[in-house]
């Protein structure tokens, strides 16, 4: 088994896919603990869809302007980040909870982004192919340049969370107490959503919406299932985000199956195993 696994990753594009998956899995695994505990799972998928709409807008604009492929790639990155910033602003506004619940704004953002992406992709010469890559991803085609771009963005996100870990935790899970001692929870909330949005915007360029969303949720749920302490949940979630990558890629290569779907299924098996461990502890 080990020999077969090593043989798989002697191929250049498989090594690139492994590196990209490990980076995305680790960063999404860490942020996913916040996403699950703060009950903002739908925010994650909404930001991912808005990032997709930004890419679709960039592809349509690039085609209309007749840009070269390299310029196209830079423009899609700018479009994804710009739309995520719009989403962060939209979801951070204090809506009247009596008349307009926050979930309504998130739902509107998701629906409009999805509709806009579909319309723009339909007008793009290569729209259908790009839409499939955005939704399901093609981790096997990532380049070292793509990996480097995400690594830079991921490093910035990780650095912010390392420097301000106490502030993020305190304002996320006890905002009233944090406010009474001088913190400004709304500002930290916006910053958290910004780090989440940046991660999503750059990650879907590598692995697609489906895998990013799965890696934001499943590793965190697995970690929170097997451990009772929050400080342990973060490293466990990072590990659970990274572990399924190699196994999923190996299965997809050996059986000629979609790589992203295989990684998601391995993540789900890990989640089931975590649930089994939790049940045995209670017995």
Image: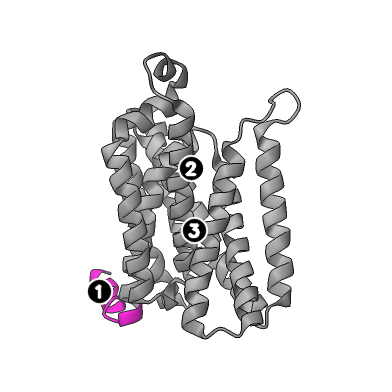
- Sequence-first tag of 1 and 3: 1
Any magenta on residue 117?
Answer: no
Residue 98 or residue 131, whichever sits in front? 98
What label sits on residue 193 in the rendered view? 2
Q: Are marks 2 and 1 in contact (CB under 8 Å)?
A: no
Q: Residue at x 47, y 65 (%)?
A: 207
Q: Quadrant of residue 127?
A: bottom right
- The answer to whether one can see residue 52 in this image is yes
Mark earlier in primary sequence (2, 1) = 1
Q: Where residue 36 sits: x, y (%)? A: 49, 37
Residue under numbered circle 3? 201
Measured from the top left, where is residue 179 in percent x and y? 43, 18
Badge 1 density bin: few <14, some 14–19, many ≥20, Cα 10 Å: few
Q: Which label is found at residue 95?
A: none
Q: From the image, which quarter does the N terminus lie in? A: bottom left
Q: Nearer the viewer, mark 1 or mark 3?
A: 3
Q: Residue 6: give its label.
A: 1
- Circle 2 — which element? helix
Q: Residues within 10 Å of mark 3 (few under 14, many from 20)?
A: many
Q: Quadrant of the C terminus?
A: top left
Which span of residues is magenta-colored? Answer: 2-13
Q: Is residue 8 magenta?
A: yes
- Farthest residue to the front: give it: 65
Residue neighbourhood size for the residue with mark 2, other residues' Cα within 10 Å, grouped as few (<14), some (14–19), many (≥20) = many
Secondary structure, mark 1, is helix
User: Would you say 136 lies left or right of 256 here?
Assistant: right
Foreground residue among 12 and 82: 82
Magenta segment, prevailing SS (helix, strand or loop): helix
| CB atoms of marks 1 and 3 within 8 Å | no
Q: Tell me the element at label 3.
A: helix
Residue 10: image location, x then y, percent: 26, 80
Judging depth in this view, the residue of 111 and 68 nearest the camera is 68
């Amino acid at each position: 088994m080990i020999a077969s696994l090593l043989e798989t990753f002697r191929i250049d594009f498989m090594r690139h896919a492994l590196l990209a998956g490990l980076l995305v899995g680790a960063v999404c695994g860490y942020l996913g603990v916040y996403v699950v505990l703060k009950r903002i799972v739908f925010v994650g998928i909404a930001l991912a869809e808005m990032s997709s709409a930004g890419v679709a807008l960039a592809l349509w604009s690039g085609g209309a302007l007749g840009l070269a492929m390299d310029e196209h790639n830079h423009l899609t990155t700018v479009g994804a980040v710009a739309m995520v910033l719009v989403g962060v602003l939209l979801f951070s506004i204090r809506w009247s909870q009596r008349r307009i619940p926050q979930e309504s704004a998130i739902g509107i953002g998701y629906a409009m982004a999805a509709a806009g992406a579909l319309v723009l992709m339909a007008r793009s010469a290569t729209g259908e192919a790009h839409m499939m890559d955005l939704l399901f991803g093609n981790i096997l085609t990532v380049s070292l340049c793509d990996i480097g771009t995400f690594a830079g963005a991921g490093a910035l996100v990780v650095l912010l969370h390392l420097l301000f870990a106490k502030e993020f935790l305190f304002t996320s899970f006890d905002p009233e107490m944090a406010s009474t001692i001088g913190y400004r929870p709304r500002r930290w909330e916006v910053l958290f959503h910004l780090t989440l949005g940046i991660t999503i915007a750059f990650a879907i360029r590598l692995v697609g919406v489906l895998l990013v969303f799965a890696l934001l949720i499943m590793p965190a749920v697995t970690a929170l299932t097997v451990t009772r302490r929050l400080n342990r949940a973060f490293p466990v979630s990072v590990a659970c985000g990274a572990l399924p990558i190699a196994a999923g890629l190996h299965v997809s290569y050996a059986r000629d199956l979609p790589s992203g779907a295989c990684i998601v299924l391995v993540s789900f098996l890990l989640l089931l195993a975590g649930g089994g461990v939790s049940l045995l502890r209670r017995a």
